[in-house]
Amino acid sequence: MNHNLAELPQHEMDKINIDLAAAGVAFKERYNMPVIAEVVEREQPAHLREWFRERLMAHRLASVNLSRLPYEPKVK
């Protein structure tokens, strides 16, 4: 298996970049940061938008099993 990402074909690099964009959207959604998934999707190449939606759904489902940021109750 090749671990040097610079040696991957361009279409594989594009898919990795799309996956990173989807992961970023899912992260921001998880922590209630401002993000509009549809806008990020429109920024992706048209032929990879379906891949973006698939990866976004996978990242959203994976985040269900992750913990949230530590909660600190307010002291009255």
Image (cartoon, grey):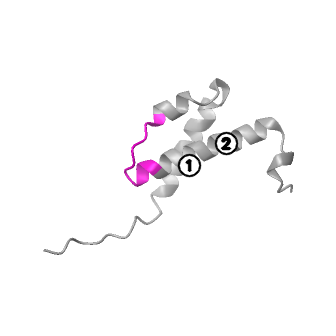
Looking at the rendering, the stretch of residues picked out in magenta corresponds to 28-37
Q: In this rendering, would 3 be left or right of 73?
A: right
Label of residue 14 in the image: none
Q: In this rendering, would 45 be left or right of 65?
A: right
Q: Amino acid at mark 1?
A: Ala
In percent of width and height, residue 71 lies at: 32, 69
Relative depth, front residue between 19 and 76: 76
- SS assignment for the magenta stretch, majority: loop
Residue 46 highlighted magenta (yes or no): no
Q: Residue placed at 48% from the left, 31% from the top? A: 39
Q: Residues within 10 Å of mark 1 (few under 14, many from 20)?
A: many
Q: Residue placed at 83% from the left, 47% from the top? A: 6
Q: Residue placed at 50% from the left, 45% from the top? A: 25
Q: Decide: marks 2, 1 in contact (CB < 8 A)? A: no
Q: In this rendering, would 42 be left or right of 16?
A: left
Q: In this rendering, would 9 be left or right of 35?
A: right
Give the labeled residue for mark 2. 17
Give the labeled residue for mark 1. 23
Q: Secondary structure at mark 2?
A: helix
Q: Secondary structure at mark 1?
A: helix
Relative depth, front residue between 21 and 64: 21
Report whether residue 60 is seen. no
Q: Residue placed at 20% from the left, 71% from the top? A: 74
Q: Amino acid at mark 2?
A: Asn
In percent of width and height, residue 18 lies at: 64, 40
